[in-house]
């Protein structure tokens, strides 16, 4: 089983902000008859992609404590770090860019810091969805405010591509998926 974690913050206030791209990608993976259950301090949905089991988790602990929810789900399902994929916003990629990798540093992303600390490892898979950097102003304000209409439309396309990447990881494995995804142009 692959555990796919979407990072974000609970509540409608944050639902369409750059910091919630993880939640938004997972919402696109929910089958028509699927529904979220409250488990592991988050929302959980177990589904399948081509007969492969997939656990989707949206931690409701707020971004900075996401690791607690992830750790509980991994323990319950006995999922190793190598079979955990975290979907998150990435300031260091242009808006709409998507990159897939295993491990690495957190680069100041508090959600990733929490996950790494709780797991005692940085070797989980990461699907990085570029949100770009603000031209001016505070980064926290940028991440927690909705984008303008043009940027939102560009991000919406990237969210659909990110959904496809998760399915590609399930179907072809991480190495083949990384080779295919990371060769594509940086921006959609």
Image (cartoon, rainbow, N blue to C red):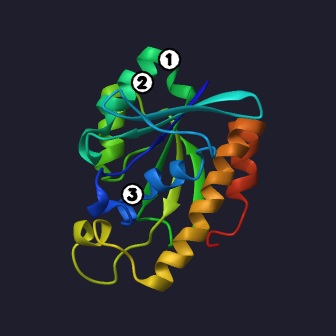
Mark 2 residue crowding within 10 angstroms, few (<14) / some (14–19) / many (20+): many
Is residue 96 visible in this depiction of the protein?
no
User: Residue 34, which numbered label?
Assistant: none
Percent position of residue 163, x then y: 62, 52
Circle 2 sits on which residue? Answer: 73
Give me the C-alpha separation between circle 3 and circle 2: 20 Å
Q: Secondary structure at mark 3?
A: helix
Tell me if 42 is positioned left or right of 62 in this view. Answer: right
Q: Quadrant of residue 112?
A: top left
Q: Is residue 49 found left or right of 135 in the rendered image?
A: right
What SS does tag 2 mark?
Answer: helix
How many marks on residues? Answer: 3
Relative to the observer, which residue lies in front, 133 or 22? 22
Please report contact status of discs 3 and 2: CB closer than 8 Å, yes or no. Answer: no
Q: Secondary structure at mark 1?
A: helix
Q: Nearer the viewer, residue 123 or 20?
A: 20
The quarter of the displayed image where residue 71 is located: top left
Which residue does the image show at 72% across and 64% down from the upper left?
A: 184
Residue appearing at x 40%, y 83% in the figure = 148
Quarter holding the N terminus is top right
Give the residue pinned by disc 3: 20
Relative to residue 127, is residue 66 depicted above or below? above
Which residue has dot 1 on it? 77
């Amino acid at each position: 089983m692959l555990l796919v974690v979407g990072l974000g913050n609970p509540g409608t206030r944050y639902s369409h902000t750059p910091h919630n791209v993880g939640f938004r990608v997972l919402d696109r993976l929910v089958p028509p008859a699927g529904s979220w259950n409250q488990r592991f301090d988050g929302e959980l949905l177990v589904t399948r992609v081509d007969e492969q089991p997939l656990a989707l988790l949206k931690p409701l602990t707020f971004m900075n404590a996401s690791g607690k929810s992830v750790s509980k789900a991994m323990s319950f399902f006995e999922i190793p770090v190598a079979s955990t994929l975290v979907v998150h916003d990435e300031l260091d990629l242009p808006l709409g860019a998507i990159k897939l990798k295993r491990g690495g540093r957190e680069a100041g992303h508090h959600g990733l810091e929490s996950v790494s600390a709780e797991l005692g490892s940085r070797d989980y898979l990461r699907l990085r969805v570029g949100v770009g950097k603000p031209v001016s102003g505070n980064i926290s304000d940028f991440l927690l405010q909705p984008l303008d209409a043009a940027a939102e439309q560009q991000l919406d396309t990237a969210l659909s591509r990110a959904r496809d990447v998760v399915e590609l990881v399930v179907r072809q494995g991480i190495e083949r998926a990384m080779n295919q995804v990371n060769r594509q142009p940086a921006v959609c």
